[in-house]
Amino acid sequence: MIFYGVCQAGFAVLWRKFPDRQGKRRSLAVAILALATPNVATAETIAEPVALLQGLDKITARVSKFEAPVGTPVPFGTLLIRVRDCEKNPPEETPESAAFLEIDEVRPGEANLRVFSGWMFASSPALSALEHPVYDVNVLDCSAASGFPTAPSGKVEEKTAR
């Protein structure tokens, strides 16, 4: 952070000292800001096969938690929820889970009506929310199949009694 402050101060001095000749001052400004910007290394997200979702029926005030495997439609009330992708940050990063959901409303005798299609984030449910008069659906987490955590090798650990 100290380096960033020094670069900002140096940028202000150079901006006043050198007149703009053929856009050179702009190029200098971009170069200094590029040096001052901290390099943040981000790890790849981990694709998980199951999304843990929470649904709210606004009429009955009933909250339900349920698992939705990727690619498999799961009913919730009159909604049909299909998770297309579920991504999770690695353990060493800030906790975050996101899922791409397609939610259809099932109406008897009619074609299904798509009411939501997009990414939902566990840490910010209001960022991309389902707008439905009866139901709310939120992503809670992405996990391995049936709620069992994966081992570092990607395989489920087996425990045996001794």
Image: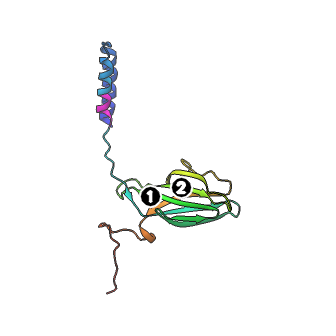
Q: Which mark is residue 26?
A: none
Mark 2 nearby-residue class (10 Å; few <14, some 14–19, many ≥20): some
Q: Secondary structure at mark 2?
A: strand
Left or right of 72: which side holds 137?
Answer: right
What x and y, as percent, mark residue 25? 31, 18
Q: Earlier in the sequence, mark 1 or mark 2?
A: 1
Q: How many other residues sit within 10 Å of disc 1, few (<14), some (14-19) or many (≥20)?
A: many
Q: Magenta part of the protein: which range?
A: 32-37
Dot in front, 1 or 2 = 2
The amino acid on which the numbered mark 2 sits, given as a three-letter code, is Glu
Q: Residue at x 31, y 31 (%)?
A: 34
Q: Quadrant of residue 59?
A: bottom right
Q: CA distance from mark 1 to mark 2?
A: 12 Å
Q: Going 64% across and 62% down the picture, which residue do you hit?
A: 78
In which image quadrant can residue 149 be found? Answer: bottom left
Q: Secondary structure at mark 1?
A: strand
Front in this rendered view, residue 38 or 41: 41
Q: Quadrant of the N terminus?
A: top left
Q: Quadrant of the C terminus?
A: bottom left
- Say whether residue 36 is magenta: yes
Q: Which residue is mark 2?
A: 102
Residue 54 visible in image = yes
Extreme right residue here? 59
Tell me where residue 92 appears, x and y as whole percent. Answer: 34, 56
Question: Looking at the picture, how far across and down is residue 66, in whole percent?
Answer: 54, 67
Which residue type does callout 1 highlight? Cys
Q: Is residue 106 left or right of residue 159?
A: right
**Magenta stretch holds residue 80:** no
Majority secondary structure in the magenta region:
helix
Q: Position of residue 132 (x, y in %)?
A: 65, 53
According to the image, label 1 marks what residue? 86
